[in-house]
Image: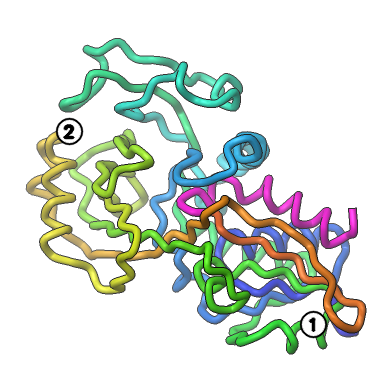
Amino acid sequence: MENDVIVVGGGVVGLTTAVTLAERGLRVRVWSREDVTATTSAVAGALWWPYRIEPEAEVGRWALESLRVYEELAADPGTTGVRLVPGVHADTVLAELGPWAREVPGLRQLAPEEVPGPYATGLAARLPLVDMPVHLAWLRRRLEAAGGLFERRTVTGFEEPSARARVVVNCTGTAARELVPDPAMRPVRGQLVLVENPGIEEWFTSAKAEATGTTYFFPQPGRLVLGGTAEEGDERPVPDPVTASAIVARCARVRPEIAGARVLGHRVGLRPTRVGGVRIEAMSLPGGGRLVHHYGHGGAGVTVAWGCAERAAALVEGV
């Protein structure tokens, strides 16, 4: 066959997996319905933190493995899009987090008077904040430098890619609901507002897993990203103006200068959440091929991308 692996899906999970495989010497091709800058991943905030993702026992390990990679990539933020930025997770108690939290450098509980806005508890940390359009373009270049190929191609079933490669890796995110099909997929709508940055240099979040309305802002180059929502069962692709106004108002409760910031644009994405958590599983295909499912990363695809890619790569290689 002309390929060892075809990865279906060109978001952060698909590209990171493809890079991991190509740098092991495999002949890898990515088939993606959209360009990397038009994927759901391109809309992400994107702060490293295990948010809306399961299973908890596995997620901590995947997240820490990815954290170590991002810490290295942050040495060249202009190229990779990864920076280490300080900030605050409000409404969060360190003792209530999983064992993974003890291994995050510098993560500490704040005194009530240190927490900004109308919040009584919070954590301080210096974490990777990823400029996703830059990072996705860098991942594609890294894939191509390793000999991999990226193609715009719509996949309606796994028969075609399995005829072109001995292993197919399914990184289709929300599309797995119809493609597999997998009724456990529950897309969760997220809406963002992009504004001119009025001088904010630290990120902030108050985003409980069960909340439909969240509050966060991330300083990215050339913009401040405001969020957000977590609306299960709502798959509207068009930004809602009432929701956008509410997002700005919530963020302005923490930093009042946000209220007067000029709006640059709006974004909507569907987090690929799955009941039962991330699915990384290999199965045999007719003719002796292998299909590796790798989807359902919820709101933390960036957070676990490198750790999950290692697990998926092991299944590709039959380990």
Relative image position of residue 221 (x, y in whole percent): 36, 51
Q: Tag 1: Cα neighbours inside 10 Å, few (<14), some, or many (≥20)?
A: many
Badge 1 element:
helix
- Residue positioned 18% across, 43% down in the render: 198
Give the amino acid type for the residue marked by disc 1 in the picture.
Ser
Horizontal and vertical percent position of residue 62: 65, 41
Which quadrant of the structure image shows residue 11? Answer: bottom right
- Mark 1, residue position: 162
* Magenta part, dominant SS: helix
> N-terminal of the two: label 1 or label 2?
1
Left or right of 264, for residue 68: right
Question: Does the rendering let one see residue 138?
Answer: yes
Residue 114 as seen in the image, left or right of residue 172? left
Q: Residue at x 87, y 84 (%)?
A: 2
311 in the magenta segment: yes
- The local crowd at label 2, few if under 14, some if 14 to 19, many if 20 or more residues have their Cα within 10 Å, is some
CA gap, disc 1 and disc 2: 51 Å
Q: Which mark is residue 96?
A: none
**Residue 254 got which mark?**
2
Residue numbers of the magenta segment: 298-319
Camera sees residue 133: no
In percent of width and height, residue 95 lies at 46, 16
Residue type at mark 2: give it: Val
* The quarter of the displayed image where residue 262 is located: bottom left
- Within the magenta stretch, is there residue 22? no
